[in-house]
Amino acid sequence: MAAIGSILLLPLGPLLIPKFYLVFLLVYFTCFLYTQVNHLFKFYITANLMTKTIRNWNQAQRGDDKSTIDDEALEEMESALKPIDESSFVHAFIVPNYAEPEGLLRDTIKRLANHKNAQSNYVIILAMEASEVNYEQKAESLADYFKDSFLHFLVTAHPADIPGEARGKGSNVAYAARHGCAEMMQRGIDRRRVILTVSDSDSSIPELYIKEVEKSFNQSEDPYFLLFAPPIFFSRNCFEVPAAVRMTDITWSAMVMSSLSNSRGLSFPCSTYSLSMILAERVGYWDTDADSVGEDMHMMLKCFFKTDGLARCCPIFVPINLTNVQTNGYLANMHARFVQAKRHYNGVADLSYTLRNAFGVKESEGQVLATLTKKTSLYASPSFWLDKLIISIKVMEAHMIPVTSGWLMFAAVPLMQFILFPPHSTVAFVDPAENPILTSEFYATLWNIVKIITIFLPFPLFGTLAIYERLHRTVDRELYRKTESRTWRNVFDYISLPIAAWAFMTIPSTIACIKRLYKTNDQYIVAEKFFDDDRDQ
């Protein structure tokens, strides 16, 4: 309804309820500006922590850390000494895929095979879709290629006809996790040792990420309530896609990064994340219904509610390198990114899931019960009621801002100016005597404040992108060892921001929200990702 409401408000607000509409715009734009400034500061914190983590790793790799360790670092190392030893972990990587190029999957898995402990501590769970034509040959080829590279290489095939399931990454991951975990336990692996990592088919996971997960696991008082979330990064083929696609993914990754710097641990993973098998079993693994199509955010929400607020998201400040959607041809590439955006915004279903669990909405009765402060177990977090409120606001922000901000930011003020102050009397819609801006000094002041605020709305985004430019070059050169990175010429990418905002945020999110009113299941379509074996080495 937010999508329809924001569109209808544009013409009807100034015509029917101009006074209320003015107050609404003031509140909306003020809240939007506040959230964007808040995200800017959090993104700055995340960028600094990412840089620090990468440089500390490089320093340790060079063997220079012994001469430069200070007292604070020594205390941190001592606090990390726990009964669980690093080498005892078994990392199970779930790699869901559907109609992906075999070369891309081989490259993704090969990057894991290059890690130091891959043969002794890594398990690959290749999650195939049984509906994919000739998936068996692809799985057999990959299993044979990596037969001596890992502790175990498991293959699952998710059936397409399971009743009640919504097809997508979430249902494939759920099937692979259940069967993969059962297989690992049959092979004698202790469930307490297993850390599950959900990966995309194009996720380039550095060894540093695994080390930081283990470090955070060891330092935590109760690691079995943690979901580990890294930032996402797009640097593998970013110069081979249209600027609008590139800028969309940059702003997307920046939003994910800013959300990680949350002092209460109430943030959401994106694409790639890790959690213990103990936590996955406790919450009943991944959901597979139509409300869980955005499997990454949904799994964090499920862990949070199923553990009565004890589960938290632990940021891992090591970027996971992904590929931009890429096809042959400019327009084809833009269309492919639009298809991907529509699929991403189908995650709006998480809003209803969150409200049901946070505020006790019972579907059978169709009424809201006052259960905000109710605890469902003796071990619930003492601040569960506050955390439920905060996480509900965060989910609403994640899904309501994209669908409303485009319409209101770009069109609200110009259209209201045109309706209330027409350029010619022949197009006058409102009698000057009924124009609150002309007849009331109070509403005239509100109108001026609204126009001033709208001028400042883009500035937090500009600040975020300025920080990102420096971060991108740092990550490329110091973590990925790339010689080619973003330069001053890429400043022209920003010209495409309005196109990117409308084509890949406002329109697809609006479509997803409206479609949600009458259709909960959608066709399973994956974005095309071109892969050149000779290029991405």
Image (cartoon, grey):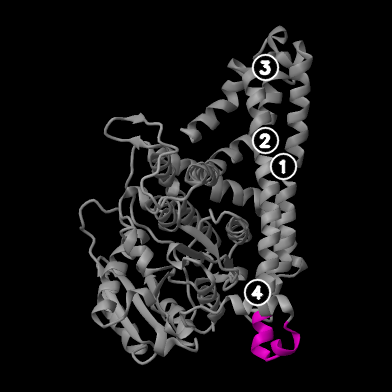
| Amino acid at dot 1 | Leu
Q: Which of 268 and 4 is in front in this view?
A: 268
CA–CA distance in space, label 2 to label 4: 36 Å
Q: Which of 175 and 331 is in front in this view?
A: 175
Drawn side of residue 166 relative to residue 339, left or right: left
The answer to whether the residues at label 2 and label 1 have Cβ atoms under 8 Å apart is: yes
Q: Is residue 91 magenta?
A: no
Q: What stretch is highlighted in magenta?
A: 55-69
Q: Which of marks 2 and 3 is in front?
A: 2
Name the residue tied to disc 4.
53
CA–CA distance in space, label 3 to label 1: 30 Å
Kind of element beneath mark 2 = helix
Name the residue tied to disc 3.
427
Q: Main secondary structure of the magenta part?
A: helix
Name the residue tied to disc 2.
29
Q: Quadrant location of residue 426?
A: top right
Of callouts 4 and 3, the N-terminal one: 4
